[in-house]
Amino acid sequence: MGRLRQLIPRFSLRTLVVFLLLVTSGVGLWWRRGAWRLQTEFFAFLPTHIQFSSDGKLVRVECPGDTDFTGGPSRSVWDATTGECLQWQNVNEVRSTERHEDTSPDGSRHCFYMRDGMLGDVVVADRASSTVLAVLSWGGMAPTHVLFSPDGGAVLLADDWGQVIIYRRRRPEWWWGVLWLWEFWLTVALAALFVWSVWRDRKALRKEAA
């Protein structure tokens, strides 16, 4: 029994707690490592025209509507972060514009639909090199609206039935972009703390042995 106890590493409660926090942080970093994350989604009935507000915080939607369900043409304003409808009103007419691809305001990225069989996803690519930077999950027929926000940090996708999805870019798409994530620095800090705690434990055991 004494021999077995010597073979089993001895760690303090502090080290075990830090280890569990490190594992949790590492899993969270892996789960959220993607450059683009789903920000919100909502349903706007049969949209024909969609655009971001100048600051990118709101989404304006125009729908021809159906007199049996919605009372005719309408314009609505949605929160781009929460997907909440902030304003809705009937109008006499609406615009009809479709945009199946878009270029970011700074001209560095191009967003378009890529079909895979009957369905497909939306791709964000580098305009200079045509390198695919991200694939935004869509899983449906070609969206009728694809557009960047004014700051280029978000992409809105919508189909003609009314599904609207907004993705937000959290970091640069390249491998070094993880440096922009607070989850990365939290994991690094916990890893350093874990190494320090193990060193303290080993140091304490050597004193006991002496």
Image (cartoon, rainbow, N blue to C red):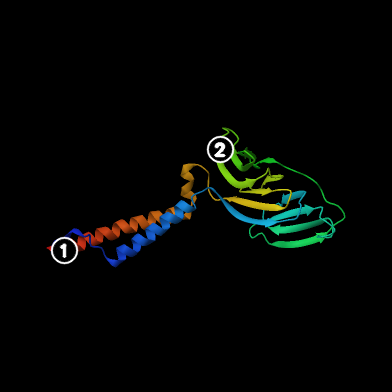
How far, Cα to Cα, is label 1 from label 2? 56 Å
Q: Please state the horizontal and vertical placement of residue 205, each as a whole percent of the image.
A: 18, 62
Q: Nearer the viewer, residue 193 or 136?
A: 136
Toward the bottom, the furthest residue is: 13
Q: Please state the horizontal and vertical placement of residue 102, each as a whole percent of the image.
A: 67, 41
Q: Please, what secondary structure does the residue beneath circle 2 have? A: strand
From the image, tell me which residue sits under label 1.
207
Residue 119, by quadrant, is top right
Which residue is at 34% across, 62% downward? 18
Q: Which mark is residue 132?
A: 2
Q: Is residue 174 left or right of residue 121?
A: left
Which residue is at 74% across, 48% downward? 160
Q: Can residue 111 be seen at all in this image of the molecule?
A: no
Near mark 1 (Cα within 10 A), the count class, few <14, some 14-19 or many ≥20, is few
Quadrant (top left, top right, bottom left, bottom right) of the C terminus: bottom left
Q: Is residue 210 left or right of residue 73?
A: left
Which residue is at 62% across, 42% downward? 120
